[in-house]
Amino acid sequence: MHGGYVDAETEAEEVCEFASDYIPGLLQTEAYTRAVFEASGAQRTQQQLEKDVALRMARQRRLSDADNPLSLVAVLDEAVLVRDYGGDEVMRAQLLRLVEAAKLPTVTLYVRPFRGRPRVSVGGSMTLLTFSLPEDPDMLFVDYVVGSLHREDEPDQHYVRDARIKFGRLRENALQPAESVAYIERLAAEIYAP
């Protein structure tokens, strides 16, 4: 029914994402996006890199689109806030971008800090997409070394349900949104101060 991830996200009403390696694409600055793409080791021409960066930036517009808004609930492992992609200046700008994005009514951020919270075991990043039409089942995307696996068909719905339960536990065990934003601001000031 759906094509690849970007096609599915275009149709989605809500994205729930757990990020364990890098900041979700919907929240990345252009410089951070470039750094992530360069670190991936994928073979891209300069033209392909520019096209991929432009696509990622275009996808973000739905977060503030009045006619067709996309809701994003993101649980960020602390690792994504301190893992260096692009150097101190890029990272500081990226963390400040998260703080600004959290002000949007469509964006809810949770941080899962290294210490002080109960642990929920997760194998890696995952993204759940929800659609407005009842006949469109929720979809699960799980990243792995050379791409992602997605589940959407009826035989796969138990995977989607299990992932949604795990995402709920991650969210419950993370800092709440206001605490998360304050945590991000503190990291930006302490680690990436100009």
Image (spheres, rainbow, N blue to C red):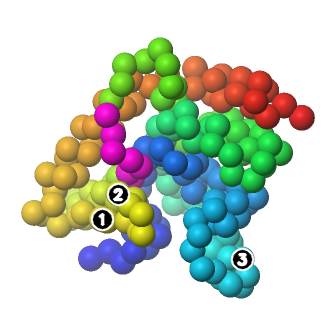
Q: CA distance from mark 1 to mark 2?
A: 6 Å
Q: Earlier in the sequence, mark 1 or mark 3?
A: 3
The range drawn in magenta is: 121-127
| Label number found at residue 150 | 1
- Give 85 or 7, whichever is nearer the viewer: 85
Residue 145 location in percent, x, y?
Answer: 42, 63
Going by the numbered disc 2, the residue's amino acid type is Val
Going by the numbered disc 1, the residue's amino acid type is His
Secondary structure character of the magenta stretch overall: loop
**Can residue 29 be seen from the camera position used here?**
no
Left or right? Give the position of 95 relative to 22.
right
Q: Which residue is mark 3?
A: 50
Residue 52 location in percent, x, y?
Answer: 63, 74
Residue at 36%, 32% (x, y): give it: 170
**Can residue 43 be seen from the camera position used here?**
yes
Residue at 50%, 25% (x, y): give it: 114
| Label number found at residue 132 | none
Quadrant where the C terminus is found in the figure: top right
Q: CA distance from mark 1 to mark 3?
A: 26 Å
Q: Which residue is mark 2?
A: 142
| Farthest right residue in view | 194
Quadrant where the N terminus is found in the figure: bottom left
